[in-house]
Image (cartoon, rainbow, N blue to C red):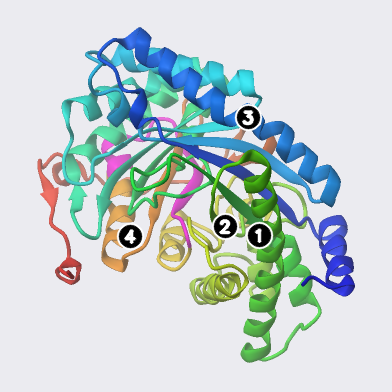
């Protein structure tokens, strides 16, 4: 049972330390929507999503009011559309038509984002997969709420370098097609390795084929709460430091568990997972970088950053799994540059580089996230960055991702403004040496030796 002291403590975390439930995400399977006719398919998709999610936003708002817990986003994730559209889509334009249908139902329902304009191509691309991928620039340019993700590798299959090369080109095209809006389309597009089936966080969310017909996943975030807790034990030893983070993560996860159970009961949809991720926002005091500074670094990116982040990530997971039997998704510390004011400050002062961020992704829960780079960066260089990050995920048996924005018309020293939760980002320099001969090789990087476990 939750006692009165816990209630008081939770209220304090909400009112003073930026604790929130970042998202309630309803996952919906669209496998039974498939049809050979594109118009029938779009109609089936709209009707099924609307049927399950018509009360999602109102339920989230009701829970927020009744329990006094901020619930920032209400989202939907769906079966990867390359699977659903395979029979009906004969051109990329057919997939764009589905994107417009998804955008319409998302807007009609009032959700913030809808994820699952996706394909899983870690071992190879079907014709349907390639059509969807090539449709992404137009789809993201012409829609408001759609998020897209492509899984190009896994520990079991290796890395599909044909897909990696293509995604470098697609990211550049998406940047061009949305250049009048700060190349914002790229902020809704992520390339993954080892993508989880149950991730509630955008842009990488989709509803995996192993999931039930519909589920409720909840993503909780509380970097401000962790920072405040560490301020109370400043200069304590590592044992006390770790115990404090772990206990704080436990309390944060309990809040998410409460919201998830309520949402599940009220919507009549099974509870899936709690994703306990320290996902920052541009708000002051809601920063993972500030936690790293509280641990003892002058700036994020200083020597010791990777070790401090590894410690933080591990203790967050340990605290979370004690609070709920169904912790999943990504669950750990996110390091999106544009969404974390402390990370932005570290880039501005020259302490944090892409290479240091890459090292940090070896031990955190995502990858190179919301990084703005010069608009004239070659597509092959972007593909090389994706390949590096996918290799980290493949070898370390973890999820890694790249969400990178080549801001058209901008150079190092400029700043790109996205607004809202996406924040703003300084343009970061990229290694200028060429990797095109490597990227242009066709085929697949084989799975590592430790993948052969049956």
Q: Which residue is mark 3?
A: 111
Of callouts 1 and 4, the N-terminal one = 1
Tag of residue 411: none
What whole-number distance in Å separates the C-alpha atoms at marks 2 and 1?
Answer: 7 Å
Asked whether the beta carbons under mark 1 and mark 4 sit within 8 Å of each other, the answer is: no
Asked whether the beta carbons under mark 4 and mark 2 sit within 8 Å of each other, the answer is: no
Q: Which residue is mark 4?
A: 393
Instruction: Please tell me whether residue 46 is drawn above or below residue 322 in the rendered image.
Output: above
Q: Nearer the viewer, mark 1 or mark 4?
A: 1
Q: Position of residue 233 (x, y in %)?
A: 77, 83
Instruction: Please tell me whether residue 48 is drawn above or below residue 422 in the rendered image.
Output: above
Magenta region includes residue 379: yes
Of callouts 2 and 3, the N-terminal one = 3
Of callouts 2 and 1, the N-terminal one = 1
The residue range painted magenta reads: 365-383
Element type at mark 2: strand
């Amino acid at each position: 049972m939750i006692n009165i002291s816990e209630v008081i403590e939770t209220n304090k975390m909400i009112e003073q330390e930026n604790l929130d439930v970042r998202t309630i995400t309803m996952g919906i399977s669209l496998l039974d929507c498939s049809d050979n006719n594109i118009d029938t398919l779009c109609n089936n998709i709209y009707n099924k999503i609307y049927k399950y999610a018509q009360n999602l936003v109102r339920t989230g708002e009701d829970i927020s009011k009744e329990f006094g817990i901020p619930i920032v986003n209400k989202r939907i994730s769906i079966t990867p559309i390359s699977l659903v559209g395979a029979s009906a889509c004969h051109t990329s334009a057919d997939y764009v038509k589905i994107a417009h249908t998804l955008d319409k139902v998302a807007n009609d329902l009032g959700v913030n984002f809808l994820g699952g304009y996706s394909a899983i191509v870690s071992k190879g691309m079907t014709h349907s997969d390639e059509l969807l991928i090539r449709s992404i620039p137009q789809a993201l340019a012409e829609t408001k709420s759609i998020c897209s993700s492509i899984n190009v590798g896994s520990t079991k299959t290796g890395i599909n370098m044909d897909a990696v090369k293509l995604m470098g080109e697609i990211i550049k095209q998406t940047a061009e097609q949305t250049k009048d809006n700060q190349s914002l389309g790229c902020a809704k597009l992520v390339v993954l390795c080892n993508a989880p089936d149950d991730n509630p966080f955008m842009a990488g969310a989709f509803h995996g084929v192993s999931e039930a017909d519909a589920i409720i996943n909840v993503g909780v975030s509380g970097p401000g709460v962790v920072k405040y807790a560490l301020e109370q034990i400043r200069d304590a030893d590592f044992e006390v430091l770790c115990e404090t983070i772990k206990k704080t993560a436990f309390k944060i996860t309990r809040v998410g568990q409460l919201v998830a159970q309520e949402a599940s009961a009220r919507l009549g949809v099974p509870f899936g997972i709690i994703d306990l991720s320290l996902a920052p926002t541009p708000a002051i005091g809601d920063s993972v970088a500030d936690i790293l500074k509280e641990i003892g670094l002058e700036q994020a990116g200083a020597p010791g950053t990777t070790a401090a982040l590894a410690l933080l990530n591990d203790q967050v997971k340990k605290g979370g799994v004690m609070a709920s039997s169904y912790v999943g998704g990504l669950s750990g510390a996110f390091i999106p540059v544009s969404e974390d004011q402390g990370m932005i400050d570290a880039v501005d002062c020259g302490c944090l580089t892409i290479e240091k961020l890459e090292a940090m992704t070896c031990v955190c829960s995502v990858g190179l996230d919301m990084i703005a780079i010069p608009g004239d960066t070659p597509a092959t260089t972007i593909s090389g960055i994706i390949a590096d990050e996918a290799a980290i995920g493949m070898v370390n048996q973890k999820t890694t991702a790249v969400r990178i924005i080549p801001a058209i018309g901008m150079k190092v020293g400029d700043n790109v403004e996205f607004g809202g939760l996406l924040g703003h980002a300084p343009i970061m320099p990229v290694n200028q040496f060429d990797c095109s001969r490597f990227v242009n090789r066709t085929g697949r990087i084989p799975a590592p030796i430790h993948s052969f476990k049956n």
